[in-house]
Structures are given as structure tokens and as C-alpha cells.
Amino acid sequence: MLDTGTATAAKDGEAWTIRALLARHKLAGLVAAAAIAVMVALLIVGLLGPRAGAVSDSTSCSQWGSANRDQQAAYARLYVREHGPLRGRGVIAAINAGCAQAFGEDVSDSVTVVRAISGNF
């Protein structure tokens, strides 16, 4: 007859617990703990990792590409307030066009958004 009430018990009558498994298999437990620690660290870095800061006149095209839409829109408003509106197109479109050219010429790290707007680099 099968004893279904003791499915969690080991053959020697000892209950299976995580503590008992770790006591029997120390190396496997250390490897599992290290793997969990690495996964948690990667998750934290992904959640709290580098973020684009506020965009300013000295922001490079490389940094502009990392800025989110809200940051780009906030800079566009700041630019219009400090430098006046652009003729023909918006600030974001002008920066994107200038930065695309800077990326094509492989100078995106040294060209600022103000220089990208003017196309003078």
C-alpha cells in the first residue's frame, strides 16, 4: 500500500527542506546563491543604470540620442526661450538633422546640439 501522506519525506524519514539540501550539497548551494546574486545585480543595474541627464546647450549628439522625448521637448522649449524660434522647422527636427549629419561624419561625440542646429561643425 502506498503512503501518500509522506510524499515530502525522504527515505530515511527526514523531511526535505532547503536547509537540509544545502547542508548536503554545499557547492551546489554556493553556485545557486552566486547565480541568484548575479541575476539580482543585473536586474538592479538595468533598473537603476545610466540614464540620460538633462539636455543643455553643451549636450553632444551622442547624448541627445540617449535622451527621451520628454527631455528633448523640455530642451526645445528652453532653446526657444533662450535663443528664439527657428525658421522653417522645429528645434527637435533641426537637432535630429544636424546630429544625423554629425553621426555620418563620425563627430557625434564632439558636436553639441547648438552646433547641430546651426550645421556648423
Image (cartoon, rainbow, N blue to C red):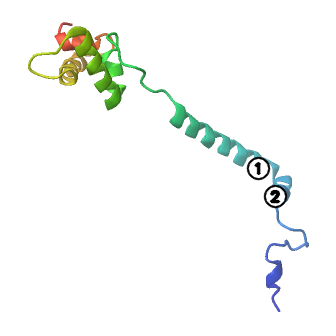
Towards the viewer: 109 or 26: 109
Q: Residues within 10 Å of mark 2 (few under 14, many from 20)?
A: few
Amino acid under disc 2: Leu
Q: Residues within 10 Å of mark 1 (few under 14, many from 20)?
A: some
Is residue 74 visible in the rendered structure shown here? yes
The answer to which of marks 2 and 1 sits earlier in the sequence is 2
Figure quadrant of residue 116: top left
Q: Is residue 67 above or below residue 82?
A: below
Figure quadrant of residue 80: top left
Q: Is residue 54 left or right of residue 78?
A: right
Is residue 107 visible in the rendered structure shown here? no
Extreme residue toward the right, this view: 13
> Who's the residue at 82% across and 62% down the image?
17
Q: Secondary structure at mark 2?
A: helix
Q: Which mark is residue 4?
A: none
> Who's the residue at 80% across and 58% down the image?
18
Q: Is residue 106 above or below residue 32?
A: above
> Who's the residue at 60% across and 43% down the image?
39
Residue designated by label 1: 29
C-alpha span from label 2 to label 1:
8 Å
Amino acid under disc 1: Gly
Residue designated by label 2: 21
Q: Secondary structure at mark 1?
A: helix
Q: Is residue 22 above or below residue 56?
A: below
Extreme residue toward the front, this view: 81
Q: Residue 101 appears at what percent x and percent y?
A: 19, 18
Would you say the residues marked 2 and 1 are in contact, meaning their CB atoms lie under 8 Å apart?
yes
